[in-house]
Amino acid sequence: MLQAIGLTSTRHRGLPPAVDDLTFEAGSGSVTALLGPPGSGKTSTLRLMLELEPGRGVTYFRGRPLHRVAHPAREVGVLLGDVPGHPARTVRGQLRMLCAAAGVPASRADEVLDAAGLVGLGDQRIGTLSLGMDRRLALASALLADPHTLILDEPAEGLVAREADWLHGMLRSHADRGGTVLYTTRDPKEAARSAGHVVTIDSGRLLADQEAADFSRTRLRPRVAVRSPHAARLAAIISREARAARRSVEVVTEASSSRLSVYGSSCAEIGDTAFRHGLPVHQLADEVGDTGPASRPRDSGVLGDGLRDNGLLRDCDPLSEGEGEGKGGDGAAAAARPATGIGAVAAASRRAAGGRAPAVESAGAQLPPRIRRRPARGPLRPVRYELRRLFGVRSTTLIVAVTLVASAAVSVVLARNGRAPLPNVLVAWPSLLPLPPAALGAGLLGALSFGDEFRYPALAAGRGTVPRRLGLLLAKLAVSAGVALSLGLLVVLVSAESLRLVYGGDLVQVPSNVMSLAASWSGLTVGCAWAGLLAAGIFRVTAAGVAAVLAVPVLMVPLIEAVPKAPTARSMSGLPGRLRELTWLQWPQEADRWVLALVRVVAHPVGTALTLSLSVLVCAYLFTSLRGRVRW
């Protein structure tokens, strides 16, 4: 069961809250529709329930608030808007990536593809899906972890009748298995047709909490739609004949002067009337009309006597119950109204907490608990998620291919005159370029790691941010480092093979300082990848990551080279031995060469610039992450 108690959104600039003291329930095994016109607070209600917006109130999912659920994806499946996936990613790839985020096996992706009717579209790109298929994918994403509760914001909006019927059939099937379904809609006919329970709100306040049968009886009325060029004359004749026959017939002129809505009559009677008086009729059809929600004063919360006196309460009062339709005075209306306010908060909270009193703030005992907007959770399997995110789009393969081709071409050109050093030829780094193609490619892949995350936030749908959890950061750093090292090795191998193919096999020889060169090359590629990743994570855009990579040779290296250099009085040649004595660790003698190579890399101007840049970026990333958590 889902219980929303006292939901109240935060006021902005003195305006009334979008949601004001809203309390309702959505039972297990049923579909509940949250009905309201545009701007009535439906979406804000869902966001308050999911702790995506600050405010007051509490929402219990089977007796627990969402922030106390260990694995929220296995308790609540959410559909807010469209699928936030990369348009170049396949449907199956998107679901497999989300499987890693939810901590479920990858085989679950094929199961939900079958359930959503997307088996034949598993290899299709998300950007090519129609609206109906996109909505099916969104529902499949919500069902990945097999949650008990489904919360959907206008899932059938814009769908054709066949797709909408399929969607509501899926929701009813989930409810029949014992799940809880809550979805928002603005169409009362859709709510009456597809839901078993209807909660009507307007201006953020509860108007009615009814079963579908009661809602249909009090809100929807049969009518005859008439279109005629003489609509005003026909309306007068129908009203006059109804009064003469002492029949209850209501004629409403629509916004268009040629259209009428007639309540309490039939197509045959209106057609006969128009024929007798020689009036042409262009349309004559039976419809089900929406009488609209009955409004009530915001201060008293009861219907006015004037509404009850003129008979409208009988037809359109959504608060009246079956046997008391318009008869029973204020007592019946009060009995039909759901309880709201602090009394309902206390009672419902005690029911959900097993009789214990709800936890409210001591300074405001008459206010429901405060809802704090909480940061998004990271993926449960971050390394697996990052690997599927990286290799699930064609841009990664394209960047690697372009880097290898450009490196091979530059290497062949550099080796032509024979004046460039062999290490520069193998890594394709001429003096004219600030960085070799491999470093630029690694930096671009690192920048896309967070840049695509913010552009297509699959991890944080509806939150407007990407989780900055330590596990996700470490996974991105590890995966980007592995990709950078692999790219650097491939560049060297491809360049050597290109030189052997073009100039023969005597050109490429293993240099004596291969360890130092390998450490330098590895540090450069990994450092560029991390610089792009951290900068994109800080500034939330891929271009910032690329700019951070280019800033190392263009800005940082000239600054470091401009610093006056003092004469060296001491040497670090014995550093490996002193480290061994300090750490009490025994490592092979070969490791000493790697330590010295690493020291030489850091002491190089490019290495120093890259180290300083990474230090600044790490501090900035931690600062923005901590500031974000304090703000939430």
Image (cartoon, rainbow, N blue to C red):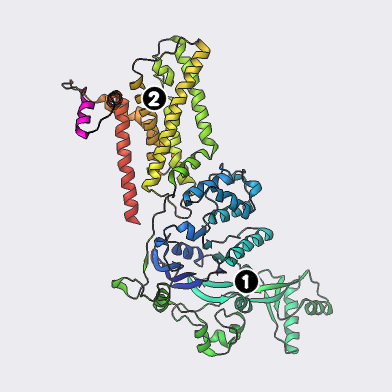
- Mark 2 lies on residue: 434
Residue 17 showing in the rendered view: no
Q: Is residue 546 above or below residue 310?
A: above
**Looking at the image, which residue is at 42% across and 61% down?**
69
**Looking at the image, which residue is at 64% across and 58% down?**
159
Q: Is residue 519 above or below residue 75?
A: above
Mark sitting earlier along the chain (2/1): 1
Would you say the magenta stretch is mainly helix, strand or loop? helix
Q: Quadrant of residue 520?
A: top left
Whole-percent x, y for residue 408 in the image? 49, 20
Q: Is residue 242 left or right of residue 632?
A: right
For the residue pair 272 and 93, the one nearer the viewer reads as: 93
Q: Secondary structure at mark 1?
A: helix
Whole-percent x, y for residue 275 in the image? 83, 77
Q: What amino acid type should be assigned to the residue bearing mark 1?
A: Ala
Between disc 2 and disc 1, the foreground one is: 1
Residue 3 showing in the rendered view: yes
